[in-house]
Image: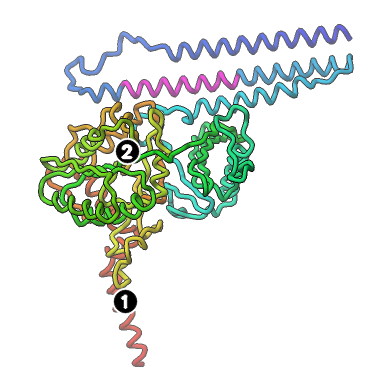
Amino acid sequence: MPRRGLILQTRTHWLLLGLALLCSLVLFMYLLECAPQTDGNVSLPGVLGENYGKEYYQALLQEQEEHYQTRATSLKRQIAQLKQELQEMSERMRSMQERKNGGVNGIGFQGNKEQAPTDLLEFLHSQIDKAEVSIGAKLPSEYGVIPFESFTLMKVFQLEMGLTRHPEEKPVRKDKRDELVEVIEAGLEVINNPDEDDTQEDEDSPLGEKLIFNENDFIEGYCRTERDKGTQYELFFKKTDLMEYRHVTLFRPFGPLLKVKNEMIDITSSIINIIVPLAERTEAFAQFMQNFRNVCIHQDRRIHLTVVYFGKEGLSKVKSILESVTSESGFHNYTVVPLSGEFNRGRGLNVGARAWDKGEVLMFFCDVDVYFSAEFLNSCRLNAEPGKKVFYPVVFSLYNPAIVYANQDGPPPVEQQLVHKKDSGFWRDFGFGMTCQYRSDFLTIGGFDMEVKGWGGEDVHLYRKYLHGDLIVIRAPVPGLFHLWHEKHCADELTPEQYRMCIQSKAMNEASHSHLGMLVFREEIETHLHKQAYRTNREAVR
């Protein structure tokens, strides 16, 4: 018996030594792969007279960097696997030793049972650290953003539709329904049974009883999946008779949900400065103010409106509309900033942001053709945080009502057009103009690029600035934000890239694929109907 134990112990030592040498070899290979190559025979591009620009060198450097990062990631993954195998082997050997000792001394191996869950939790928490949950990741372009899906108790709002999915739908797949139910229940568990380290105060109901939240208190949620890490959930709850919201962040690292955050958010005193750049288009502004009166003045009441107006023509009309609203409702929280020169959205928003002189404020960059709800304004407050997060909601853009409702006597009122259907509109995922961000973050990042002229490009430039920085960019479709259809004109003065973007936007704004197809094949359809009618008449004569 002593000889067998000695042999087992010797084999164990040699096995551990072999695994350690293997790990050292992989580490040495990793260092060799990551070391820069110095080949004296390789000539730099441009030395022999080639005409290479700055973009070429940047692309070359980025390609090399991506190659090394891919290789380094692969080696790191191999090292992690070897470490995990080594740890598992060590655990098995320890278990065997404890079993052996337990058989002799009559003591079990309870210590190993407690060790395994600890290691598992450490791994799962490391997945949270790798994911973009607590701090933003620097991304190369707007295509690298992983957008959120937003959801309520009954509906999911999603960007990727394909052939079977819709912009707004009830989750018909059982796994999706079960997932959302589980997440909401887990959020309620976190709120109703908080840990000692949660940064929230105990609240009592008006009757002195402990507040218990239920699924009816769930307001909205956002989720997104990083395929190599897990799924992030942002949940917001609110009691009807309370002003504060409860915010719970959960993360599923391809395993159990782990609480990331449980906090109370008080938005009762959060003012939003809605900044609208404008030139002429006084009729559209009058329609905008109707929605503004209903939502901002009658419901929200925590809004300041800044109108940056270009030119003199129509300025008096705009002021008259604002004065009329003031006389009807007593609303005085607005500023009109007149500017000279041609319309430039970036310049207008820059001036509007700097016109505010009362310290920090949450800004909503808006257009005169946008319809928003009171719920959206709260989403704006909940998803923007100074020095931490900026909110880039995806707008649902409505198609041309003359085409959508061509079979009716006329388009219905605007409020009845605000539905999320394939034939009524689309998620404007290529637009970055509507955004909620704090003034300090906007000024720190440098605002809009004044070198961009004409249509469209200034929004993408600002969006990319945030992607290249450390702030978290919240990108998600929201149900309470609509872009109303209006005629678009693409000016000849635009650059080829801007003109292409303008035409693309114009085409996508007209109608759905099916409706456009009906317009394209109208003559063919009419010919078919005539033939059918002719055959029917001939058969009737016979």
Q: Taking the image as drawn, is residue 485 in sight?
A: no
User: Quick one: SS at disc 2?
Assistant: strand
Q: Quadrant of residue 515?
A: bottom left
Towards the viewer: 147 or 436: 436
Q: Position of residue 355 (x, y in %)?
A: 22, 35
Nearer the N terminus, badge 2 or badge 1? 2
Q: Is residue 495 left or right of residue 478?
A: left
Q: Position of residue 214 (x, y in %)?
A: 60, 47
Q: Taking the image as drawn, is residue 41 in sight?
A: yes
Q: Position of residue 68 (x, y in %)?
A: 41, 20
Magenta stretch: give its range: 61-82
Badge 2: residue crowd in 10 Å (few <14, some 14–19, many ≥20): many
Q: Is residue 10 left or right of residue 265?
A: right
Q: Quadrant of residue 485?
A: bottom left
Residue placed under numbered mark 2 in the picture: 363
Q: Position of residue 261 (x, y in %)?
A: 54, 32
Above or below: residue 318 compared with residue 341: below
Towards the viewer: 398 or 27: 398
User: Quick one: SS at disc 1?
Assistant: helix
Residue type highlighted by circle 2: Met
Residue placed under numbered mark 1 in the picture: 529
Q: Is residue 19 left or right of residue 26?
A: right
Towards the viewer: 500 or 525: 500
Above or below: residue 520 compared with residue 77: below
Above or below: residue 81 compared with residue 412: above
